[in-house]
Amino acid sequence: MPDGSARTRTARAKKVPAGEAPAAEPPAKDTARVRSPDAERTRLDIIAVARSEFVEKGLDGASVNDIAARTRTTKPMIYYYFGSKEKLYAAVMEEAYGGMRAVEQSLRLEHLEPMEAVRRLVEVTFDYHADNPDFVRLIAIENIHLARHIAAAPAIAKRNAAVIEIIRALLKRGEQEGVFRKGVDPVDLHLLISSFCFYRVSNRHTWSAIFGRDVETAKHAAAQRRMIVEAVERYLAA
């Protein structure tokens, strides 16, 4: 039981001038609460709004105040969940890459013939880039920053390694069946596929201004989709 002096000190500590609210203490970071369904919904809501903000304004131009104003939370809570604007940006990047990787893993390519599997992979990669120009813009922004945020987030590299393993297994199976040429590097093949799909979206505005062609029209998009599929098929053919 506290003695009289202890009670007196406690009373003095709690005494607040009239009309003035006591200073609020920052919330303790409770792991269980952060991982609760409500907390996860809040986190994903912040990421969705932040993604739009970063796509529109870039990392430097984006404002945590503006992000908070467009969510059902506050600026202190955004820092509570993510720690800083840079870490929030890294979380947005991880979520963006995760969308592409989730689509690839859902294809179940191991159940398709090797060439059919490659064709499907290329088509899905093309479609994902075409349907998600904000994904392309985020990657372009991160390259402006020399990929330092991705480099500081090992989870992103680990998550993206999955597509290389998918391609590696596919190449091995195609070689064993005599369908693919030997010695194709899976990272180089991924670069070949992604580069065309990425460039036509990232540079669509300059391409249109210089050459007067809108690559997003149904006619041109369909032709380009067939072209990259055929290019990869012919490159891989034994």
Image: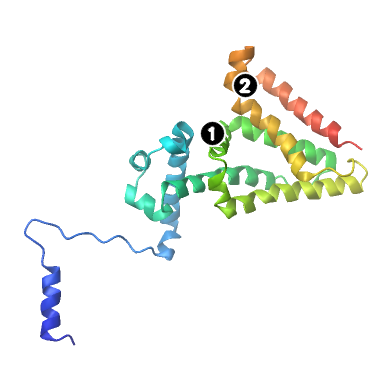
174 up-or-down from 232: above or below: below
Which residue is drawn at the image coordinates 47% and 35% (left, top)? 58
Furthest residue toward top: 212
Which residue lies under the disc numbered 1? 134
Q: Residue at x 54, y 52 (%)?
A: 152
Q: Which residue: 38% across, 50% down? A: 78
Percent position (x, y) of residue 179? 90, 41
The amino acid marked with disc number 2 is Glu
Q: Nearer the viewer, residue 145 or 42?
A: 145
Circle 2 sits on which residue? 216
Distance Cα–Cα, label 2 vs label 1: 15 Å
Picture coordinates of residue 43, whole percent (x, y) = 44, 50
Q: Which amino acid, mark 1?
A: Asp
Q: Is 67 on the left-hand or right-hand side of 207?
A: left
SS class, disc 2: loop
Q: Which mark is residue 126?
A: none
Give percent across and percent down for residue 38: 41, 55
Residue 54 x, y percent position in the rendering: 46, 37
Residue placed most toward the observer, 188 or 103: 188
